Image (tube, rainbow, N blue to C red):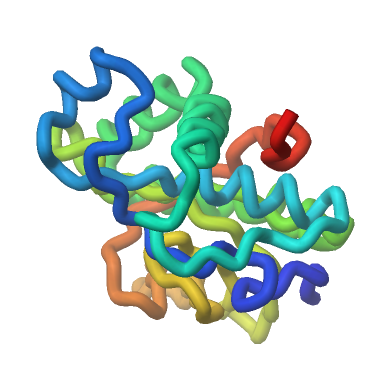
Amino acid sequence: MDTSFLPILNGFKFQNRFEKNWPNRFIKILLGNSAYGLCGGMVFSALDYFLEGKSIITTSKIVDLEPDYIRHLWKRQFASMPVRNYFLLASGTFQKDSTLLTNTFNKEIPKVIESINQNLPAPIIIIRSKKLENPMDNHQILLTGYDIKGPITNFTSYDPNHPLKTTYLTVNRKSREENITQSTGEFVRGFFLNCYDNKKQFSRN
């Protein structure tokens, strides 16, 4: 089952790696000169365009983005991380691997499948870190379709870290082999469905 969201067509053409584009002084002090990501802002913005039937911008380099557009992505980033999500992330990072995986299988995947069945791509937050490990390791992607073959569920996805390609998230429910993997190689402990906050795509007023 696939939605009509095609990562190559409906996703951004640039990679999720920003530098020195801070929305305010606090963020500048917090991040310093380090590069950072706006995966949630990119996922929400791509979904904004898709749901409104609009073509996404074709800019392929971040340096070519207008400052106002980067500020827009920051706003969507903040929208993708309400207070509720910080509690969910904190809870997930302190859960045992087996508990987090079971919760993902039994609670989150059915919600993702229900969303995709309605042609609504599912934004998820991937939990990679444990306890007090780097929270920046956690990540947001957009699940756009799925294929179930026995104990294996293969999700297609748009990953802002990997533009211009369809990536895959594979769920393995085989007894004693239970895990979740990404085709891009990153580690996955579990994930939860994000609550999409609808907003019109960027426009110049």
Residue 66, percent from left and from top: 49, 44
Give the number of callouts: 0
Q: Which residue is pictured at 72% across the width and 41% down the height?
A: 201
Q: Nearer the viewer, residue 55 or 65?
A: 65
Q: Nearer the viewer, residue 24 or 143?
A: 24
- The reply, left or right, for residue 143 in relation to residue 24 is right
Residue 148, percent from left and from top: 68, 79
- The reply, left or right, for residue 50 in relation to residue 98 is right
Q: Name the image quarter holding residue 157.
A: bottom right
Residue 107, percent from left and from top: 61, 44
Q: Please say whether residue 1 is visible from this viewpoint.
A: yes
> Which quarter of the figure is the N terminus placed in?
bottom right
Q: Which residue is pictured at 51% across the width and 78% down the height?
A: 164
Residue 137, percent from left and from top: 25, 47
Q: Where 76 sits versus 29, above or below?
A: below
Q: Name the image quarter holding residue 178.
A: bottom left
Q: Where 127 sits versus 81, above or below?
A: below
- The reply, left or right, for residue 15 in relation to residue 10 is left
- The reply, left or right, for residue 84 in relation to residue 197 is left
Q: Name the image quarter holding residue 152.
A: bottom right
> Which quarter of the figure is the C terminus placed in?
top right
Q: Nearer the viewer, residue 170 or 159?
A: 159
Q: Which residue is pictured at 52% across the width and 34% down the height?
A: 68
